[in-house]
Image (tube, helix red, strand yellow):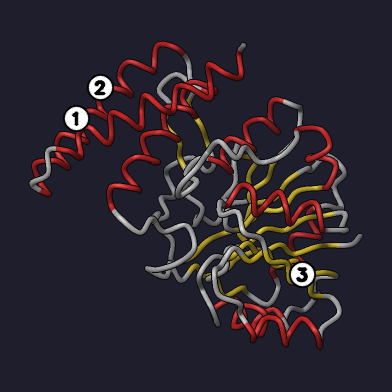
Amino acid sequence: MKLSLLIPTLNRIGVVYNVLRHLEHQTRKADEIVIVDQSEMRDHLLEEYATTHPEVKYIRIKQKGLPNARNVAVRHATGDVLLFVDDDIIPDSEMVRIHLDNYRDPSIAGVGGAVRGGYDRPDPRAPVGTFFPSTGLIVRNFGTRDRVDVQHIPGGHMSFRREVFEKVGKFDTTYGGASIMEETDFCLRSIRAGCRLVYDPRASLTHLCLPMGGCRAPRFEDWLFWHAHNGILFMLRHAWKKALLPFVFWRMARFTLFSFEKGSLPLLGIGLLGLVRGVSPHLSSRE
C-alpha cells in the first residue's frame, strides 16, 4: 500500500525543510511527499531538497487558504493513503508505519493520531473526537492514550484512504481565513457517507504551534471575523436547529467581552458581520 504525505505551508521558510529532515528517520518512509507552498517568497531550501529527493513534489500556488491547499495536494498525490500533517511538526519515528498498519483493516477509512503540544490538555475522562449536534459541542482530546472509533480527527495529523475523497468530495473552501472547522466538516461528511474513522495514539507527533505563518491570522480582527464566519457555517450544516440560538447568543456575548477587553467597540461589529457572512454560503448551497 502506497502512502503520500501531504504538507500545506504558508510563509514558513526553512520550517518545512526541518520537517523533511525529521521524516528521513521514519521506520517506514512515505512513498511520496507533496508540499503545497502558498508563500509569497520562494523557499530555496525546499526547491533544492526536492531536486535531490525524487519522492518529493514541491508545488507553488498563488491562492491562499488551507482547504484549497489540501485539495491541490490531493490532486497531485498518487498514494492509496493520504496523510496530512501541519508544516510545523516533529513526527515520532513510527508515525507513517502506524498509520499504514491501521489500514490492514479494510473497514477503516480514516486515521487520526495523537498531537502533543497542541491547544488541548488530555482528559482521560472525556470522549475523544466527538461532536454533539444537539449543542454543537466539539470535543477534541487528541492526546489521550486509548485507540477508539471517533467522529472527527485532528486536521494537523490525519490520514484517509483515497476512496474517501472519491465518495465525499473535496475540503470545503468556503471555510476561509484561519480555516477553523474545515477538517471537522470533512470528517462529519465522511461519517455520513458511511466511513469509519479511528483515533490511534500510537501514531504521534509534536505540534510546535509557531506564532507566525501557517493559518495564523495576521490581525485579531481577521481571526474574529473568520472564527464567527466558520463557526456559524459549521453549525448550520451539522448541528440541530435548537442549538443555533444559544450558539449565536454566546458568540455575541463573547464578541462583546472582546470589545471591552480590548477597548474597541468595532470588534462587536466585526464578529456580527462574520456571523452574517457565514450564513450566506449555507443558503446558497440549499438553492
Mark 2 sits on what residue? 249
Quadrant position of the N terminus in the picture:
bottom right
Q: Earlier in the sequence, mark 1 or mark 3?
A: 3
Asked if disc 2 and disc 1 are in contact, CB closer than 8 Å, the reply is yes
Q: Which mark is residue 33?
A: 3
In the rendered structure, which amino acid carries the disc numbered 1?
Ala
List x then y, in percent, for residue 105.
85, 47
List x then y, in percent, for residue 262.
12, 49
Alpha carbon distance from label 2 to label 1: 6 Å
Dot 2 lies on which element? helix
Which residue is located at x 75 percent, y 66 percent?
A: 34
Which one is nearer the viewer's eye here, 173 or 120? 173
In the rendered structure, which amino acid carries the disc numbered 2?
Phe
Which residue is located at x 66 percent, y 85 percent?
A: 21
List x then y, in percent, for residue 225.
34, 40
Mark 1 sits on what residue? 253
